[in-house]
Structure formats: structure tokens, C-alpha cells
Image (spheres, grey):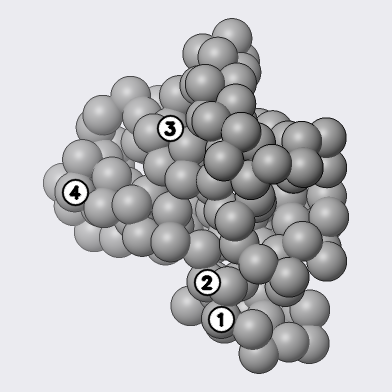
Amino acid sequence: MAGFFSNVILETTDSPLIIASAGASAMLMFGLPHAPVSRPWNLIGGHMVSAIVGVTCYYLISDTLLATSIAIPVALVAMHLLKCMHPPGGATAVTAIIGGEAIHQLGYIFVVIPIFFNSLILLIVAISVASFRDKNPFEDLL
């Protein structure tokens, strides 16, 4: 759903805007909603900081393998320092580097659309689903 809306906003039909790391995030948000890595700040912050790292590595390092090899640990350290550890963020950083021309043309817009936008939609859906349970796992964070 988030990928669809990102494509509509950007007026494109390129499927790379359906970010694979969002699937891993959905597994965490719905499968492990009480896990620290599933908290709202971890979801949104982890993806956004990783996207920034990935786009920056893409621009600064011409060798794809080297850029990817540097982006993952830098994203990990950044998430740790910002207290927004979200493991799928590593894949977000990699996507910014190897995602192809549709991703590369976005530049830092990639951080907002599709990454922030997709994360926000996922969070809204996760909170909505959680509201049907006995206890909302995110209520102490809202």
C-alpha cells in the first residue's frame, strides 16, 4: 500500500519504490510489536538515518561494493547513536546504493519518499491493528 502511494505521489510506475526493507519492518511491527526495534522512533528514525547514509555513500563512493560495505556499518553506528536501532534499516541503506536508476534519480528525496512516507503508513497501520488488541503495544510511546 505504501509503495503504491509513493508511486502515485512521484507519478511513476517504477517498482523499486516498493522497498524490500519495508517487508522486514512489517514483520517486526506486526509479529514482534513489543520488541524495542518495533517502536515508532526505531521504525521511522532507523529507516531515515539509514537512507541518508545510503544516499551519501552512493554519492561519495563510486565503487558499489565498497559503498555498500561502508554504508551498512555506518548506518548501524548512526542508528545506535540516535537510539533508533531498526535492523531493516541496513537494507534501506543498501537499497539507496543498488536500487537502480529510479532510486538514484531521487537523490535525498529518497529519504522522504518513499522511505519516510512508507514508514509512516506502516506505523499508522500497525497502530490501527494494535488498537484492536487488548493492549496497544505503542500506547506508552504516543
Give the number of the mark in front: 4 or 1: 1
Mark 3 element type:
loop
Q: Are marks 4 and 1 in contact (CB under 8 Å)?
A: no
Q: Which residue is mark 4?
A: 31
Please say if 102 is above or below 78. Answer: below
**Dot 4 amino acid type:** Gly
Q: Which residue is mark 1?
A: 15
**Dot 1 amino acid type:** Ser
Disc 3 from disc 2: Cα separation: 18 Å
**Dot 2 amino acid type:** Ile
In the image, taking residue 5 as reference, residue 57 lies left or right, namely right
Q: Which residue is mark 2?
A: 18
Q: Are marks 3 and 2 in contact (CB under 8 Å)?
A: no
User: What is the crowding at mark 2: few (fewer than 14 residues within 10 Å), some, or many (at least 20)?
Assistant: some
Disc 2 from disc 4: Cα separation: 20 Å
Q: Nearer the viewer, residue 45 or 128?
A: 45
Q: Which residue is mark 3?
A: 86
